[in-house]
Amino acid sequence: MRRAVIAFTAFLGGLVFLLAGPAHAGPAECQGLKGTLKLQGQPVNGVKIAVTTEGGQPVKEVATNAQGAWDVQVDKPGKYKVTLDVSSLPQNAEVRGGSNVRNLTVYEGNCSAVLFALQPKGAPGQQQNAAAEESPFWTQLAQLTFEGINLGLIIALAALGLSLIYGTTGLTNFAHGELVTLGAILAYAFNVGMGLHLIPAAVIAVIVAAALGYAQDRFFWGQLRRRGTGTIAMMIISIGVALFLRYVFLLFFGGQNEAFAQYTAQPGVQIGPISAAPKNFVAMAVELAVLIVVGVALLRTRTGKAARAVADNPALAASSGINVDRVIRIIWTLGGGVAALAGVMLGLSQNLKYTMGQDILLLIFAGVTLGGLGTAFGALVGSIVVGLFIQVSTLWVPPELKSVGALAVLIIVLLVRPQGILGRRERIG
């Protein structure tokens, strides 16, 4: 215990030292509005963008460059109005949804991303409005259900690693959200920084994150376990690790929102009442495939059976000849890899930022707890339920409160079934 306290104190000291450094040591500060216009994956040049204050006072008017990008820096934070001049669009292009005005808030030291989704004139998405007006509730329900499953699969990828790590080590890892962020930032570095296409960049990011997951247990968590550090002390240390990594990301990545170089603005595909970009369908297929492969591996392979044995009873597994430390390192490697993949998928569906893992950490814990602590399949089921309730609840509650529905379901289910949906009853005391 004394060594764990010393280690935690060292972490806090390093964190204080890092935060005490000069603020200008990171990337150049950005405070303003920016965006990229693309039509069917191709940049649109020469489109005029006007930025005014909330009261209508002009700030600046710019035009998109050859890459379709534009950028307006503002002197002070506040609410701003961004207007796209539709007369400057190509003749075959229009703004999806018809609205060419966006109202955004710029925070101090941050750049807000402005999204104008363009589509060819007469695209199928615009022709469905009449049908949508006839049955708006069922149309919205179908769309939100699709989006909920998409979100649930992303949460499931992240929750899978967290659940397996808890099952084999008993560690509640509050730094798991930072592994999600790490995957997105690594993919961004290989994609935008080194010029690789997003697909190979994502593969390399997952491999690197998996290797870092192995290194975490080999050189840090494994050492704490061998010294007899308790799970409560390790949980507290994980909070310090999360804070440390979060500010490292801020130092090197910056506080602004970024996007991948590919698949940022795709025209929607209409399938019945559901409208989504092609990347969403591909991402969901990849997520499902990975979850199925991991599930089959846990059930059919020797390593998977060993992992389940360690999760059930580590002492008995060790006495049966299973190398417990080796199994735990494999789980950490797998957990780091799938968490990184979740970060890449999350970055595809929204902009990248250094707090993206922290933002979904509560939902990850909700999915793991709802499904049953330490059960991989429970994490999958719980995450799908959480994702569905988050999105579908916006039919009745404001979007700002959409997480309330998922947490309410979590509370109700745990009151009826404390061990979670797929968890096992355990004797307490």
Image (spheres, rainbow, N blue to C red):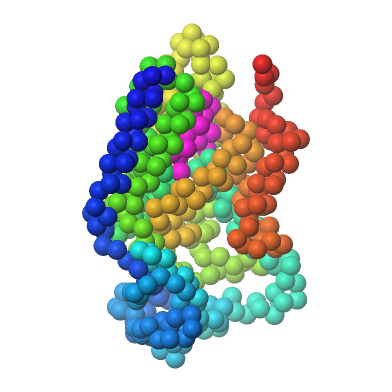
Above or below residue 293? Residue 190 is below
Residue 378: percent from left, percent from top:
62, 36
Tell me which residue sits at (49%, 83%) in the image: 55
Q: Examine the rendered structure and indicate whether residue 49 appears above or below residue 142.
A: below
In-front residue for pair 170/327: 170
Look at the image and tell me whether residue 34 can be seen.
Answer: no
The magenta-colored residue range is: 160-177
Q: Nearer the viewer, residue 117 or 245?
A: 245
In the displayed structure image, the side of residue 256 where residue 195 appears, left or right: left
The C terminus - image quarter: top right
Give the residue at x 53% y 33%.
163
Q: Position of residue 94 (x, y in %)?
A: 49, 83
Magenta region includes residue 74? no
Residue occupying the point 65% across, 49% down = 406
Against 18, residue 257 (above or below) is: below
Residue 83's spot in the image, x, y percent?
46, 83
Q: Is residue 248 visible?
A: yes
Residue 170 lies in the magenta-colored region: yes
Q: Which residue is farthest bottom? A: 87
Position of 260 with respect to 17 (left or right) is: right
Q: Main secondary structure of the magenta part?
A: helix
Residue 14 lies, in percent from the top left, at 29, 37
Q: Quadrant of residue 15?
A: top left
Give whichever of 239, 262 is nearer the camera. Answer: 239
Q: Residue at x 34, y 52 (%)?
A: 250
